[in-house]
Amino acid sequence: MSEIDVCVVGMGYIGLPTSVVLANAGWRVHGVDINEKAVELLSNGVATFEEPGISAALKSSVVSGNLSVATVPKESKVYIIAVPTPIDANFEPDTSYIRSAVESVALLAKADDLFILESTSPVGTTEMIRDILHDLRPDLSNAVMYFAHCPERVIPGRMMKEIISNDRVVGGIDGNSAEKAANLYRSFCEGEIHLTDARTAELTKLTENSFRDVNIAFANELSIVADHLGVNVWEVIELANKHPRVQILQPGPGVGGHCIAVDPWFLVASAPMKTSLIRSARRVNDSKPRFVVDKIAKYLRETNRESVALLGLAFKANVDDLRESPAVNIAVELAEQFPNVRLSIVEPFVDELPRALQDFDNVHLVDLQVAFDNEQLIVLLVDHDIFKLIPKSTLEAKDLVDTRGMWKELDI
């Protein structure tokens, strides 16, 4: 009999919360991560990223003995794969982390085991996991085993709440796989569990993020049009949204995070000749940081200013997650274009600059007060709550570039 109920491969933004809620629901969970420093921290009940509620829940799961963490997997009844699925330089899905995860547990697999893919993935990946396992373990080809996809549906800043309260889609390669996986999630999920097949579940997750990407792209393109025409885009959106059947989203400096900025490319790769709208939306959102850079660059050249403050580096408000962040890309481009201009960066959720910015002599991480004491040009890239507390009188004395519409009442 296995000492472990669930082995979670990948202890990042999805694997860690999943492991914690399972452990606190009574399951014996073993988390696996190749990062030795992360393993050490997690084993001592220290979370590796900021997220409301996760620290207390992690400590509880470790103290209870229900959660262990190591760099190698243990034999289990259930294996959850929660590793990254990035895109390569050609916007093609990179499933190598998933392959490596399957390979790491293949020798431990046995009949009646359940494999769950939580990583957002191209359609057909759950079947790929089954095929890889059967290739590595031909002795199990005729054994009864279960394979399912249960994509995450949480957002940074609300992970610990939404992982419990949100509905979940569970897709199996067969009905028994879906039902077996659903029983695991029913142990902690208060939302409704929707059963389907694996390919439908995979496409559903990609559809959710692509829908959001397309709608954000409309808002971002509208902001570029409004700027060209000399019209306040925030007022346009506010007025247009008074129509009972119109709900335009808010534009920004681009789209970041490991989901919306990545997942639509999985659909494009799956059907390149049938996804022109999704591809166009991705290009619009990927081009928005360049628009912001050009706007700031024009100001710097016209005024001969030697410094600028950039507020925010995270991909969204009130988190420390910098993955695929357009704000980081904007800072890097400005640092490269203007090596003699000082970039004072304010990001209250990190203690050091990301690696992409650490080698620039003209880039400095400062606190908010220092930025406003020393800089005349202020660029808002992320609408953190702390930035909403800046007095209006302080803002009115500065030259502002607002990419989030937080200061739209100032008519800048």
Image: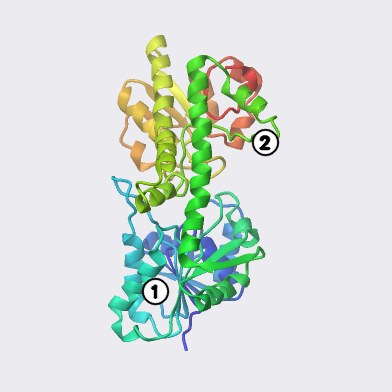
Q: Is residue 391 above or below residue 358?
A: above
Amino acid, disc 1: Pro
Query: For the image shown, how many numbered marks are present on the structure?
Result: 2
Q: Residue 31 in the image: x percent, y percent?
A: 45, 69
Amino acid, disc 2: Arg
Side of 60 relative to 361 (left or right): right
SS at badge 1: loop
Residue identifier under label 1 = 73
Residue in the picture at 33% in, 73% down: 131
**Residue 160 picture quarter:** bottom right
Side of 64 relative to 119 (left or right): right
Residue in the picture at 47% in, 66% down: 198
Q: Residue 243 in the image: x percent, y percent?
A: 69, 30
Q: Is residue 13 visible?
A: no
Q: Residue 338 in the image: x percent, y percent?
A: 33, 22
Residue identifier under label 2 = 245
Q: Earlier in the sequence, mark 1 or mark 2?
A: 1
Q: Residue 253 in the image: x percent, y percent?
A: 47, 31
